[in-house]
Amino acid sequence: MKKLFSLVLLLVFALVLSACTANEEAGKETDGETGGGEEAAEKVLYMNNAQEPTSFDPPIGFDSVSWSALNNLMEGLTRLGEDHQPAPAIAEKWDVSEDGKVYTFHLRDDAKWSNGDDVTAGDFVYAWKRLLNPDTGSAAAFLGYFIEGGEAFNNGDGSADDVQVKAVDEKTFEVTLTSPQAYFLSVITNPAFFPINEKVADENPEWFAEADSYVSNGPFKLTEWQHDSHFVMEKNENYWDATNVKLDKVHWAMVDDETTEYQMYKTGELDTSAVPAELSEELFADGSAQMVEQAGDYFYRFNVTMEPFQNVNIRKAFVMAINQQEIVDYVTKNGEEPAYGFVSPGFKDPSGKDFREAGGNLVETNLEEAKALLAKGMEEEGYDTLPEVTLTYSTSENHKKMAEAIQQMLKENLDVSVKLANMEWNVFSEEQTALKFQFSRSSFLADYADPINFLENFQTGHSMNRTGWSNEEYDKLIKDAKNEANEEKRFEMMYEAEKILFEEMPIMPIHFYNQVYLQKENITGIVRHPVGYIELKWADKK
């Protein structure tokens, strides 16, 4: 079926078009309105999710292939607005105690689940305790450590009863924090803090696994999920703000190749697309490619419990042998900023300076120094020959190109031969968390808008550490920063912690993320949060 019909054919076949399935009409819907007073055509947005979502269970789908969908299926107490700031959502208002530690949220009377049930304070109590329950196994549990009793429960040193969240009544939810948190309202926009319909979960513990059992409370509901193929969302008529949701459906493909994705965009099968590196110069030049900020890093992890990366000088040698600027110029080619620290640009300290600018460059490309450090590290370990090194990455053409670039630089600059290995994302994530990789690719997208979110990842035993690295001074700085109400002191602690991280170098930073994309001219209102997710609540298709 062609992308555009004449007005006459559109009028004649309007009913036929509205009956077409998402698969039959993938990306080929016509105008959002027929004009002339006729009934508007169904508005279907076609997007690509790249891979099968890890899970649509909020505390488990804590990754980039689950977040954006979850953010549009569900809604928490607060939601990031079009200005990227936390705004009232399921909670229409809240009160804060004088000491800044107790928040009392007042839920909307018209907040309902997609099955018609009321969203209650009890649903939040159930969901937040489940997030922290060690049996849930959520990688996002650390985000709830600011709740009094949360860390102890998650670590097995406390009980669910100790977690200070409670339903004052059906529509009043109260939480007590360990200390005042300037970024608290931003943290709880994260999908990990979405409510769960307790009644539905009790009746079916696998409620989140299939479309026909999924119950949501956000702008959209899940109506179709063909695993490893596609999934479809439809407007949730029970959503409290449904009048502001303009799309009828969102069809998500799962195509893990940017060139194929781009071809689907060109043929009308997708309304948005990533920008393939080989076409970026052309697409930026003609004005097709658009770019917005995104807080996060592309980097590699060293496993400090495996040879040869137990040695800090060998780790430093590997990092200093890499040229980040060349990688963004010739490999990724999407205008990324090379990373010489871990906290990305975009966060202001109390003096108004950007954290990254004030923190400065903590690593540099220096080939002579890299060679000297490698020789020093090998001597310290008694190596005549460096143990075999394997770099593992999750299956993706882009990750492969990056790994090959790292492999080549290490060979040319250090005369170190590195083997490459790859595996599918779900298995890769589990194996990396279990410290089974020697040297592996990774990424981090900020969960909330504060530098501490970047730095807390490398605390001893943290679920996101995945390097085996541990440093008591670093741990203390992070803990103290989380409990420090004075912003100047808090930022000084974070600056010092980042310096320690780079003195011991358990990671190899490559570049900071941005969001580069193509989008059809008839698509408006998609919000791409710098810290957060793709927001379709206000999206429209003309």
Image (cartoon, grey):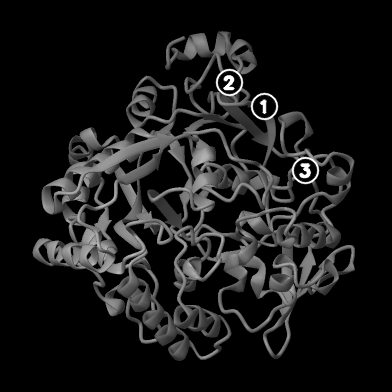
**Number of other residues with Cα within 10 Å of mark 3, as a class: few under 14, some 14 to 19, many 20 or more:** many
Q: Position of residue 350 (x, y in %)?
A: 41, 85
Q: As rendered, which of 46 and 227 lies closer to the eye?
A: 227
Within the image, what quadrant is residue 126 found in?
bottom right
Q: Determine the residue positioned at 68% across, 81% down.
A: 178
The secondary element bearing badge 2 is classed as: loop
Q: Amino acid at mark 2?
A: Ala
Q: Which mark is residue 22?
A: 2
| Relative height, residue 149 to residue 53 (above, below) | below
Task: Report the Cα–Cα distance between label 2 and label 3.
Answer: 22 Å
Q: Earlier in the sequence, mark 2 or mark 3?
A: 2
Q: Which residue is mark 1?
A: 224
Q: Determine the residue positioned at 47% across, 20% down.
A: 28
| Relative height, residue 345 to residue 102 (above, below) | above
Q: Which mark is residue 238?
A: 3
- Horizontal side of 135 relative to 509 (left or right) equals right
- Horizontal side of 162 relative to 355 (left or right) equals right
Q: Amino acid at mark 1?
A: Glu
Q: Position of residue 55 (x, y in %)?
A: 63, 41
- Horizontal side of 438 relative to 151 (left or right) equals left
Q: Determine the residue positioned at 82% across, 49% down.
A: 197
Q: Earlier in the sequence, mark 2 or mark 1?
A: 2
Asked if the residue at tag 1 contacts the one at tag 2, i.e. Cβ–Cβ closer than 8 Å, the answer is: yes
Q: Determine the residue positioned at 33% across, 33% down.
A: 397
Within the image, what quadrant is residue 229 found in?
top right
Q: Position of residue 307 (x, y in %)?
A: 36, 56
